[in-house]
Amino acid sequence: MRLAWPTIAAAQSAALASAPRPLGQLQQQFVDLRFGMFIHFNIPTYMDQDWPDPEALPALFNPKKLDANQWARAAKSANMSYGCLTTKHHSGFCIWDTKSTDYSVMHSPYKKDVVRQFTDAFRANGLKVMLYYSILDTHHKLRPNQITPAHIALIKTQLTELLTNYGKIEALIIDGWDAPWSRISYDDVPFADIYTLVKSLQPDCLVMDLNGAKYPAEGLYYTDIKTYEMGAGQRLAPGSKRMPSLACLPINSAWFWKTDFPAVPVRDPAKLVQETLVPLNENSCNFILNVAPNRDGLIDANALAGLKEIGRLWKNQGPTTPLTPLEPPIIASNLAKNQAANSSWSDDMNIMDFANDDDYRTSWQSNKTVAQPWYEIDFKNERSFNTVVVAEPKANITGYTLDYWNGVAWLPLFDGRNGERIKLHRFGRVWGSKVRMQIKAYDHQPSLAEFQVFDERR
């Protein structure tokens, strides 16, 4: 019997939603993929700029020779395991058949769904499929200080389309969120809402937010995988705690195609293998190399040759070092951010307000004459919470207590030792108006980069 399309779609959705795998297993499988292709292809391709005019007309987008099979074959020639396509970049142009906006490929001269061609071609060539999506959207005015409920609805609609209509998506790489240059916080567009939506549509889809510039390497904040944009100077610190990670770099001088790309040499394949790919893999970091198709929708000859040489020099050796089990990522809003803070005597100007300002570069530091330092967040009114995270600039504090004030007495949350730089505490939900840390053991002057309180969904 031939199934009608709605029935097929329903069956596919049911299959995707069934029996989600543990996050740790998904993280391990991702780092074991080792190497993939980033494909920056969108309206910036036709503007000679990575950030084009957000009012650029859809008429510009017309890749007359687009061949996603060429992209997939090029990825295979480099022994890559997957591809990831920029479905929407910061200027808001959508390269799939979206019903959410007219600013899309379907209103360009090309009028074909590029995401469909990409997903079909990569799967047909035995490669896994991931998608990139930008929260920042300058065309639709989804930018700092202007975000409305309609903008959040637009994000949810677009992600629902991408995660419903194109089969299994291994990972969603999100950009333009909680970055110094985007200035859209996880409160402006609630991270927990978007993360929960993604997992409800495809439970096995990893969420990777490109926020590596801000958060400490030792903690999973707002992402299933740690991320490093190498071209922006983000690097795995030598000897850092092993975390499931992703690092990205373009094979050319920029992310989107530029008119000089065919004549300018690509990055040296031998150096990419020896100095980037192999060392990253040895540290549980997957490497995604960007290759930008040209205005015809084809990869240039010099990039094709570079990929083929990478494939000659490097083979995927299979599973990487097993990861140490990790706690799930923090996805909730930080309730302590910019709340009233109190502490024992601080060191000069490094006062208590620097430990809850959402900036890991600033810190509260105890004065060296204080024998038993303490730090406190005061919500003024009682509220619920179930998680406390203490982030140090450097691991120093080894023994401490955590307590909360319930209006009558201080009640314990933790009393013991923890030498990690990022000290994560999850517990049953409590209600209180204050949270306090009393520091009992430390190697040198105690300092807190961030003292955070969350009320997580569980």
Image: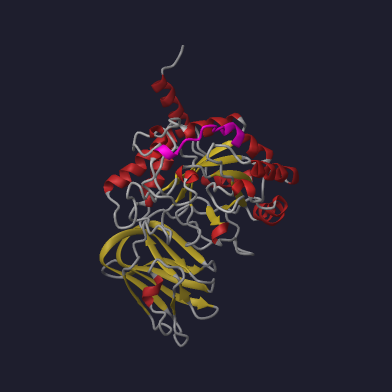
The color scheme shown is secondary structure
Residue at the image position 47 percent from the left and 67 percent from the top: 391
Task: Give residue 404's position: percent from left, percent from top.
Answer: 34, 67
* Residue 277 locus on image (x, y percent): 67, 52
- Magenta-drawn stretch contains 371: no
**Residue drawn at (48%, 34%) of the image:** 114
Query: Residue 450: which quarter of the image?
Result: bottom left
Q: In this view, does 94 lie to the left or right of 261?
A: left
Q: Residue furthest left?
A: 381
Residue 315 visible, this angle: no
Q: Which residue is drawn at 49% across and 56% down?
A: 220
Q: Which residue is nearer to you in this view: 168 or 35?
A: 35
Which region is colored magenta? Answer: 59-71
Comparing 91 with 36, the one in front is 91
Q: Where is residue 407 in the image (x, y as percent from the top left)?
A: 26, 68
Q: Could you say which is closer to the camera, residue 136 or residue 300?
A: 300
Residue at the top extreme, as displayed: 1
Report x, y in % for residue 458.
Answer: 39, 49
* Total numbered labels: 0
Q: Does the magenta stretch include residue 60?
A: yes
Residue at image point 26% right, 63% down: 382
> As displayed, is residue 276 above or below residue 162?
below
Residue reaching furthest right? 313
Judge from the rendering whether residue 420 lies leftward or rightward of residue 365; answer left or right: right
Is residue 56 visible in this depiction of the protein?
yes
